[in-house]
Image (tube, grey):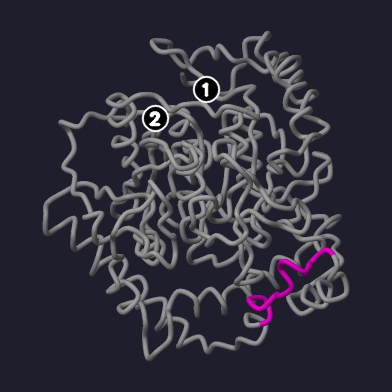
């Protein structure tokens, strides 16, 4: 069920802030303190006072919107002022205790919409841009995120996209919702970090068109590829939260108005799984999870310019520039630039560079990068061209379709990220091998967030997600 019961209007929410007060809040605190999933880094000590204030508004007849009084989790790379009682660390001890000058813009939007800023989630440290050999979902502050679904802990000998992996960098937000800590979460995505964790938590998500959601106040990787997005259990909640997060223009139609979606109104193309599943070196076949497939190698070939991988080269250059800007703008911080961050990690190696993950090669490589502006523009132009006009746009036009479906375990994310286009995911089933959810993804052209219609049609056609057995 959605937060809104079927058949109701947006005038009233069955799940009010008062429902958070007792059993649910106690359960969440116990789960947080036990730390079995390592998904929550901090709970806002103001959560109950926020709930009480929003309950009072409701009693007085003031309801801010369909998500009034609903608790929300957010990835711990979104700046919050000290009044919320939570640090903004991006998983790094170097940022513990840092003080931002402002809340992230999307935090302000969530507060204005009446959401309870409830907790901050674990993530891959610095959005996975610290070391090339760290398992997704690990940070020096939070340790290793586990799954609410998968039997057994993460296999540290597995690949980053393997069947035991929580996959990509918004893992804590996805696991938190799937485990029932909150019905809603916000994560961020540079190349699959919303889509893949949501798939493995049996959630709906949408990666919005880059630029649609403000990134101000979010610890960055690259402003040309980063975007925040919602993660939920139902499509109507996804649409309502997307309406809160986006930079909507006056008179624009709310995304929730695009619902419900019907298959009869959609023209759908499908990528051939035999061509698009991850290669075995990225996701090792295991038992009943085995399949024979090859990924579309032309992706990597076309996204290379003069022997340089466009996306990674841009991320390297952008991370150095954008993290320096973020650190320099903080009210207070132990580190003020990337070089100081690297030095801090060396000086605190026991925690930041433990024996299982002893390197920070990605940070060092980024710090040594000095890319001329014209070369950056050339690489970015190449990525946008290949991902957008020559791939996604061309396919939509050639086959006269609205949207493309693909296995969620596929490298299409590289194209979507290169183009800066929207994509979304829906749950499809569960592996017998270890219980992990699998899913389908949908992607389309720029500013076509009505891809939500596909998720809605899927939700109305197939069985509801299965909660994990915790």
Residue at point 66%, 47% (across, down): 145
Q: Nearer the viewer, residue 434 or 416?
A: 434
Query: Counting other residues with Cα less than 10 Å from the Cα at mark 1, is it few (<14), some (14-19), or many (20 or more)?
Result: many
Residue 38: which quarter of the image?
Answer: top right
Question: In the rendered image, which quarter is residue 132 located in?
Answer: bottom right
- Is the residue 58 above or below the residue 288 in the image? above
Q: Residue at x 34, y 47 (%)?
A: 441
159 horizontally vs 260: left or right: right
Q: Is residue 12 above or below residue 114?
A: above
Where 176 sits versus 372, above or below?
above
> Dividing the picture into quarters, in which one does residue 424 lie?
top left
The quarter of the rendered structure image containing the C terminus is top right
Q: Which residue is depicted at the point 73% across and 56% down?
A: 91
Q: Which residue is mark 1?
A: 66
The stretch of residues the image draws in magenta is 351-364
Dot 2 surroundings within 10 Å: few (below 14), some, or many (20 or more)? some
The reply to whether dot 1 and dot 2 touch (C-beta < 8 Å) is yes
């Amino acid at each position: 069920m959605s937060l809104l019961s079927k058949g109701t209007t947006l005038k009233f929410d069955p799940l009010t802030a008062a429902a958070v007060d007792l059993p649910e809040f106690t359960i969440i605190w116990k789960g947080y303190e036990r730390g079995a999933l390592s998904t929550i880094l901090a709970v806002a000590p103001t959560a109950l006072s926020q709930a009480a204030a929003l309950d009072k508004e409701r009693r007085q007849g003031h309801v801010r919107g369909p998500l009034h009084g609903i608790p929300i989790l957010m990835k711990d790379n979104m700046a919050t002022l000290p009044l919320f009682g939570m640090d903004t660390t991006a998983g790094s001890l170097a940022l513990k205790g840092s003080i931002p000058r402002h809340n992230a813009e999307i935090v302000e939007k969530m507060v204005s919409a009446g959401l309870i800023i409830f907790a901050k989630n674990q993530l891959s440290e610095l959005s996975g841009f610290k070391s090339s050999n760290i398992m997704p979902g690990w940070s020096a502050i939070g340790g290793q995120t586990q799954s609410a679904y998968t039997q057994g802990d993460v296999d540290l000998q597995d690949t980053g996209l393997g069947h035991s992996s929580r996959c990509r960098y918004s893992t804590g937000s996805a696991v938190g919702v799937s485990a029932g800590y909150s019905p809603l979460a916000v994560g961020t995505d540079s190349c699959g970090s919303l889509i893949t964790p949501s798939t493995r938590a049996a959630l709906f998500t949408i990666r919005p068109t880059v630029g649609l959601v403000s990134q101000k106040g979010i610890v960055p990787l690259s402003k040309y590829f980063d975007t925040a997005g919602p993660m939920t259990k139902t499509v109507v909640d996804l649409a309502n939260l997307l309406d809160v997060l986006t930079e909507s223009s006056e008179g624009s139609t709310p995304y929730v108005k695009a619902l419900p979606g019907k298959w009869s109104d959609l023209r759908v193309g499908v990528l051939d799984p035999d061509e698009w599943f991850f290669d075995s070196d990225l996701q090792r076949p295991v038992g009943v999870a085995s399949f024979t497939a090859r990924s579309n190698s032309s992706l990597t070939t076309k996204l290379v310019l003069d022997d340089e991988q466009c996306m990674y080269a841009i991320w390297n250059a952008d991370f150095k520039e954008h993290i320096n800007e973020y650190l320099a703008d903080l009210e207070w911080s132990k580190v003020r630039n990337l070089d100081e961050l690297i030095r801090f990690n060396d000086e605190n190696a026991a925690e930041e560079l433990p024996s299982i993950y002893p390197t920070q090669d990605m940070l060092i490589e980024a710090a040594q990068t000095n890319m001329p502006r014209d070369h950056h523009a050339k690489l970015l132009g190449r990525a946008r061209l290949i991902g957008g006009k020559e791939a996604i746009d061309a396919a939509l036009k050639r086959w006269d379709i609205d949207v493309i479906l693909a296995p969620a375990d596929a490298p299409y994310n590289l194209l979507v990220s290169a183009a800066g286009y929207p994509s979304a995911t829906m749950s499809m089933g569960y592996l017998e091998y270890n219980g992990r959810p699998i899913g389908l993804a949908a992607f389309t052209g720029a500013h076509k967030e009505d891809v939500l219609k596909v998720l809605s049609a899927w939700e109305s056609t197939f069985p509801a997600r299965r909660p994990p057995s915790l």
